[in-house]
Amino acid sequence: MALGMGMSCVKYLLIAFNLLFAITGLIIFIVGIKAEMRLSPYIDFTDGHFWSSAPVVQIIVGVVIFIVAFLGCCGAFNENHCMIITFAVLLLATFIAELAVGIAGYANHANLETSIVRHLNESLKEYPTNKDVQRSWDIMQTDLFCCGVFGPKDWSNNTLPVPDSCCSAREVTNGAAAACNLDSSDIHTDGCLPKMLDILKDNAYLIGGVGLGIAFVPLLGVIFACCLARSIRSQYETV
């Protein structure tokens, strides 16, 4: 059943929109993967579920968008009223999910420093007894070239030896590496707090920016879908 000229235009605009929508899904998916890889080593030092769940939500949303875009193309091409309505509902769900992640991305950086300082200080004391904490600290200090919360003295202030991960390269003498200490020439002098804050804030802004920036794209598709669905329904009613 052929549509009118105006609605035929809407039909092909909706198909074109879905191609654009698929591209936004790819962008969201890539951002989610990048954030997950960048944040995963430092999740133990963060407060709340946002830092562990937001990248996963974006990855899932990116995949769902591909499926939704395919459904929208099929519905528009076949002029299927049910598929187009389903497409519009899924678009609204996508809009809500991306908007929520975007807002959370900006909101969660507000009290970030206080939360990170607390987690770093608490976990530092557990370094000798907790293998998971030890691994997280070693990864952070090695990757970020940092030592302690504010500096290397944080370890001695807590009556703990300076970990080897605080030094860049250990000299080997008689088959054994020299211990890392405050007098080592290659010790990392910067604290880990400012470097962690930079990473977390950058990723929060990235997640928030992509979430809010792309969140409103589905609304355009909802408008096209509703116009096309109403036209298809009216065509059936007039027969």
Image (cartoon, helix red, strand yellow):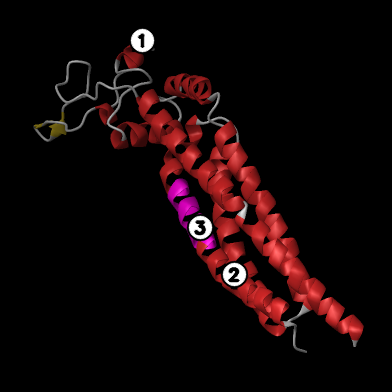
Dot placed on the residue nearer the N-terminal end, 1 or 3:
3
Label 3 neighbour load within 10 Å: few <14, some 14-19, many 20+: many
The answer to which image quadrant residue 6 occupies is bottom right
Camera-nearest label, 2 or 3: 2
Q: Say whether residue 96 is left or right of residue 139.
A: right
Q: Which mark is residue 18?
A: 2
- Is label 1 in a helix, a strand or a loop? helix
Would you name the residue on which mark 3 appears? 29
Would you name the residue on which mark 1 appears? 157
Label 2 neighbour load within 10 Å: few <14, some 14-19, many 20+: many
Q: Find the magenta span and give its range.
A: 24-36
Task: Please tell me whether the stretch drawn in magenta is mainly helix, strand or loop.
Answer: helix
Q: Say whether residue 103 is left or right of residue 204.
A: right
Label 1 neighbour load within 10 Å: few <14, some 14-19, many 20+: few
Residue at figure coordinates x 70%, y 82% from the top left: 5
Residue 24 can be seen in this image: yes
Mark 3 is on which residue type?
A: Phe
Camera-nearest label, 2 or 1: 2
